[in-house]
């Protein structure tokens, strides 16, 4: 049995550099990092260096505007605003002295709920059958689901390559080897699958997201997390995708991405089999785009 500490995107190198493991490699290109690994590293650095007790990490927006090579990278952070009810901080993902992605974390002070009742959708999404009584860990099987599939849930992607609404259930990989990912880091890693859930169709996925925004009303309480597509909107090669995040207690946040066509490098998942400890972290083909070159992080 593999050592659990293997299932992480990075090890830590000199000066705290993020040194990628095979799980950080992109499905779009062998020489690039995937999106889940990049956003997870940014989230980790911001949480460690700027997390404030009593505050809720409420929104993380990551702009993925350049190629992130399969090489060590550094994350530099700074405080933007430190107030009584809001704390804002930025992160800059750097390689070779160049910024390849940037992130903004907004934290809000937790407090008393306002009085009154507000409309709620009441949507529910629980773990796949047979997983309810199982404790999942990093590196365990990812489950995919979709409307209209012969089997509602399966550990293979192929049966769910259709036009139906997509969903996904997983315990995300750890960010750094030997360190359990925090609830915030797991939420962000899973939220990066918004693009996969919203843009995956009958011929695979041909949109590459240029950003990610994860908005959280609370942190996930279970180690495993689900995500389900809300909407896909696209025209002339530009798309918007939205999804909802679930834990075993219900909804806790949302994901939003904007994306650009990468049809020349469409990824066909119909030939993919069992997904377990896969090279993209079980969160799709990766994220981030260079619109000029049509390549994927």
Image: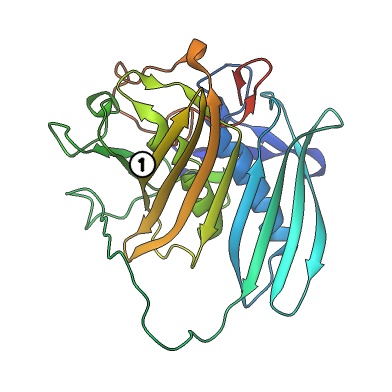
* Lateral position of residue 145 relative to residue 253, left or right: left
* Lateral position of residue 147 relative to residue 96, left or right: left
Query: Relative to the observer, which residue lies in front, 102 or 242?
Result: 242
Residue at 37% in and 17% down = 268
Q: Quadrant of residue 133?
A: bottom left
Residue 204 position, x and y percent, is 37, 21
Residue at 36% in and 57% down = 246
Please give the residue where the numbered disc 1 appears in the rendered image.
140
Coloring scheme of the render?
A: rainbow
| As drawn, 69 above or below 119 | above
Local secondary structure at mark 1: loop
User: Please, which residue is most extreme toward the left here?
Assistant: 150
Q: Quadrant of residue 253?
A: bottom left
Residue 182 seen in this snapshot: no
Residue density around tag 1, few if under 14, some if 14–19, many if 20 or more, within 10 Å: many
| As drawn, 43 above or below 287 | below
Query: Relative to the observer, which residue lies in front, 181 or 235?
Result: 235
User: Please, which residue is most extreme toward the right here?
Assistant: 97
Residue at 27% in and 65% down = 122
Residue 1 position, x and y percent, is 37, 36
Query: Relative to the observer, which residue lies in front, 271 or 87?
Result: 87
Residue at 61% in and 17% down = 294
Residue 285 position, x and y percent, is 48, 27
Residue 187 position, x and y percent, is 49, 53
Query: So how many labels did they put on this image?
Result: 1
Residue 21 seen in this snapshot: yes
The quadrant of the image that shows the C terminus is top right
* Lateral position of residue 81 relative to residue 295, left or right: right
| As drawn, 14 above or below 104 | above
């Amino acid at each position: 049995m593999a050592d659990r500490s293997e299932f992480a995107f990075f090890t830590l190198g000199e000066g705290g550099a993020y040194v990628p493991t095979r799980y950080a490699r992109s499905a779009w290109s062998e020489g690039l990092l995937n999106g889940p690994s990049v956003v997870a590293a940014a989230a980790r650095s911001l949480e460690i260096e700027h997390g404030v007790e009593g505050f809720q990490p409420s929104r993380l927006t990551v702009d993925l505007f350049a190629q992130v090579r399969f090489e060590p990278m550094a994350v530099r952070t700074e405080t933007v605003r430190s107030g009584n009810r809001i704390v804002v901080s930025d992160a800059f993902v750097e390689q070779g002295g160049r910024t390849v992605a940037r992130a903004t974390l907004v934290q809000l002070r937790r407090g008393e709920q306002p009085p009154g009742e507000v409309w709620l959708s009441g949507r529910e999404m629980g773990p796949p059958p047979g997983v309810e009584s199982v404790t999942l860990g990093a590196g365990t099987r990812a489950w995919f689901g979709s409307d209209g599939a012969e089997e509602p849930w399966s550990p293979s992607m192929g049966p769910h390559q259709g036009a139906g609404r997509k969903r996904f259930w997983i315990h995300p990989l750890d960010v750094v080897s030997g360190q359990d990912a925090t609830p915030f880091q797991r939420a962000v890693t899973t939220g990066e699958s918004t693009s996969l859930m919203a843009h995956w169709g009958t011929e695979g996925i041909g949109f590459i997201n240029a950003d990610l925004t994860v908005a959280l009303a609370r942190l996930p309480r279970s180690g495993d997390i689900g995500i389900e597509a809300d909407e896909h909107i696209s025209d002339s090669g530009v798309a918007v995708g939205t999804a909802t995040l679930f834990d075993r207690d219900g909804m806790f946040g949302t994901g939003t991405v904007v994306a650009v066509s990468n049809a020349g490098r469409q990824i066909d998942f119909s030939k993919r089999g069992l997904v377990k400890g896969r090279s993209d972290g079980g969160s799709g083909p990766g994220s981030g785009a260079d619109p000029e070159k049509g390549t994927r992080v």
